[in-house]
Amino acid sequence: MLDSYYRAFIAEQRYLMYLDGLKMTLLVSLLAIILGVALGTILALMRMTAERRGKSTLLSKIAYVYIDIIRGTPTVTQLLIMYFVVLKGVDGLIVGTVTFGLNSAAYVAEIIRAGILAVDHGQMEGGRSLGLSYGQTMKDIILPQAVKNILPALGNEFIVLIKETAILGYVSIVDLTKVADFVTSRTYEAFAPLIGTAIIYYLVVKVLTLVLGVVERRLRQSDKR
C-alpha cells in the first residue's frame, strides 16, 4: 500500500499535480461563490418585491422561474449545456465559473431571502416610521441584522460548491478529481489516487468547517451583548 501511495503522489513529483488541481478547484469555487452572491442578492431582492407589494410581480416571477429551473436540473447537465451550447468555444475555466456561479445564485438567493425574512417585521416598520425610505431601511437596518443569519449558510454553500466542482473534468478543467483520473491512467492503480483525493477534499472541507464554526460562535457572542 505504501508503494501504491508513493507511485500516486511522490513518484515523478506527482504531488505538484495535486497541488495545481487543488488550486484550480479552490479558484473556480471562490470565483463562483462571488458571482453567486452578487447574482443571488439581486434574485432575492427581485423575489422580495412580492412580499413588499403583497402580490406577485414580474420581477418576482422571473426570479422564481430561474431559481426553480436551476434547482430542478442536475449541475452536470447545466455544465455541459454551457460548455457545448451556450458558451461553445469559450475557455473551460470561464465556463465552469459561470455555470457554478449561476447555479449557486439560485441557492444563495433563497439563503439571503430567508435571512432577511427572519428579521422581525417591526424593524422595517420602525425604520419607515423614522422617515427612512424602503431602500434606506433595508440597507441600514434590515441587512446588517440579516447578515448574522446569512453568513453561516453562505459558508456552507461554499463548502458544498467545493465538492460539486469535482465534475469540472467534463469541460477539460484539470481540477483535483481530474488529476486523480490522470494519475490512475498512468499508474494503473485507482485505490491510492482516489482515496488520497478524497482525503484532500475532506481536509479542505474540515478546515473550512472549523473556520465557519468560529465565525458562528462569534456571531452568537455578539447577540448576547
Image (cartoon, rainbow, N blue to C red):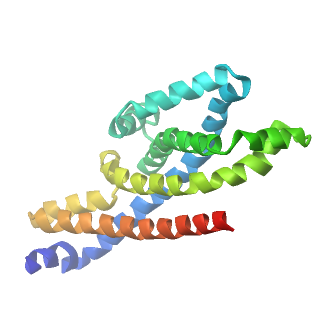
Query: What residue lies at 62% left-to-right and 30% top-to-bottom?
Result: 47
In the displayed structure, would residue 11 be above or below residue 205?
below
51 or 160, which is in the foreground?
Answer: 51
Q: Quadrant of the C terminus?
A: bottom right
* Residue projecting furthest to the right: 131
Judge whether residue 39 can be spotted in this image. Answer: no
Tell me the quarter of the picture where residue 200 sits. bottom left
Query: What residue lies at 62% left-to-right and 25% top-to-bottom?
Result: 60
Q: Quadrant of the N terminus?
A: bottom left
Q: Position of residue 19 (x, y in %)?
A: 35, 71
Q: Position of residue 54 (x, y in %)?
A: 69, 22
Tell me the quarter of the picture where residue 77 sits. top left
* Residue projecting furthest to the front: 224
Q: Position of residue 99 (x, y in %)?
A: 45, 42
15 or 137, which is in the foreground?
Answer: 137
In the displayed structure, would residue 10 be above or below residue 173?
below
Number of marks drawn: 0
Q: Position of residue 86 (x, y in %)?
A: 46, 32
Q: Is residue 10 left or right of residue 21?
A: left
Q: Is residue 57 left or right of residue 21?
A: right
Tell me the quarter of the picture where residue 170 sits. top left
Query: What residue lies at 64% left-to-right and 54% top-to-bottom?
Result: 147
Judge whether residue 128 can be spotted in this image. Answer: yes
201 or 51, which is in the foreground?
Answer: 51
